[in-house]
Image: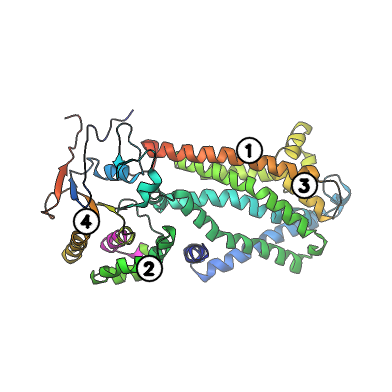
Amino acid sequence: MSSPLITDFGLRVDSGEKLQICGPNGSGKSTLLKIIAGALTPKQGKLTVFGKSMDTNKFYIQSHLALSTFSNNGFFSLLSGKENLDYFIRFHRLDRKKALEQLYPLKDLPNYRMALQSSYIKCSHGMRQILHFARAWMRASKIILLDEPFANLDVQSKEKIIFLLEESDTTTVLTSHESQGISHYRKVWIKNDPHN
Amino acid sequence: MIRIIEILLKQDFRYNYFKFNSVLISFLSVFLSLGIYWYTSQAIGTDLLDQEGWNGMSYFDYVVFGEVILLFPIFCVDWLTRATKISISEGLFDYALTTPLGPYKIIRDIFCSGIWRQILNISLTLFFATVFFSFPIEQVNWGAVLILEISFLPTFLGLGIISSAIVIQFGKGQGVISKLLTLLTVGAGLYFPVTTFPEWLQSSLSHISPVSILLTTSRDFFFNTSQNYTWVSIIPLAWSMSVFSIAIIASSLSIRRLQRGHGTYLVRH
């Protein structure tokens, strides 16, 4: 029986709040985001989003929540970034016009156009990171969960994304293994070893 | 839905026919299989025509017709399993778990995008068999065969969902499922009649196995024999209901177990 990755963890995030979960590699930051997104079920404890329990309101919660995680790709490798985003607009049954409007500010990102034109398999890590953010961002959801969103990104792209998040009233929870970078985000630390 | 399939058709086409050579090879492989059946048939001669179970067909007609009948049902099981595997390896399954629509929507989309290849395969087989090997295409009651295929489709889709659940549960198993499908098709009488099997196996195959029932009944339609097939309509219904019930339970259990952290491929950081 494997030991639990995270124990005795409690967190409350207010609407519109910007939160950064910090911790070293392997501390369970991504797992925590997957639990909040409903992809994993905690063995114990309770998860409440918008005052509703995840156990009984999963469909509603997941409709208003977007997760961007770089760990498992999650795109069709032979389709271009544009074709992939087009697919996910339809997959999520989004209003195409609104989704494209939401994506419009991303045009200023240095590699965004190239990421749209290249097939996903040929995209650099930075370009893939932008596509992952774009897929979560186009949903204009109430909560956005970003797993290591600035890894592999150049400074200009990072600042633009921070600016976009800052300007919106979207509740933002992001993970990072470093505490520097976003000074005005509330920071929560996850310990590496839950038994110590 | 149509636009979604159109987008994924591009992915499917790029994956399977990335170079012109691969298109050519797929055409040639159909022709080659037919050639092997043809020469085997020539070697056997007309001895089979009067024997029980061969429906008076030549070996070539017997196998080719059986293959055409089984291509789509077997594809449903096999391709659904592969679509699940693709969604897992591309990380799409993991992503879909975070969405309200769930992973089966992505698997369904991938599945639908691959159907055209199978339709092409069936059409090519029939075309080559008719034009180059004198397959008596006009002799078949295609309307009746199509109805029979459609009535059995939910059964095979259900079997595909069960296979997908196995892949989700264990992260592997596609190879074993392919081997089982081969056994099932051979056992159903694709290459030789069920009457050649031991008697105890014959009765269970011809009365229970959906592949066998589909194949045997379709071959009877080959000659438009007007037997009473009322009972045949009950079999697909019974199979569909039972297989689909198991499929729904298996798929929800496998996903639930995966979400509780028992999965073999969900990446943990």
Earlier in the chain: of badge 4 and badge 2, it is: 2
Circles 2 and 1: CB atoms closer than 8 Å = no
Q: Are marks 4 and 2 on the same chain?
A: yes
Looking at the image, is A55 positioned above or below residue B39? above
Q: Circle 2 sits on which residue?
A: A82
Q: Residue at x 28, y 30 (%)?
A: A3
Q: Determine the chain carrying the residue at label 3.
A: B
Q: Circle 4 sits on which residue?
A: A151
Specify the amino acid type for callout 3.
Thr
Residue B242: give its label. 1
Q: Which residues are magenta?
A: A121-133
Q: Magenta segment: does it hold A123? A: yes
Local secondary structure at mark 4: loop
Q: Nearer the viewer, mark 4 or mark 2?
A: 2
Q: Determine the chain carrying the residue at label 1.
A: B
The quadrant the C terminus of chain B occupies is top left
Residue A72: give its label. none
Circles 4 and 3: CB atoms closer than 8 Å = no
Q: How many other residues sit within 10 Å of disc 1, few (<14), some (14-19) or many (≥20)?
A: few
User: How far, Cα to Cα, is label 4 from label 3?
Assistant: 60 Å
Q: Circle 3 sits on which residue?
A: B216
Could you tell whether A152 is left or right of B151 in the image?
left
The spot of residue A156 in percent (x, y) is 17, 66
Circles 4 and 2: CB atoms closer than 8 Å = no
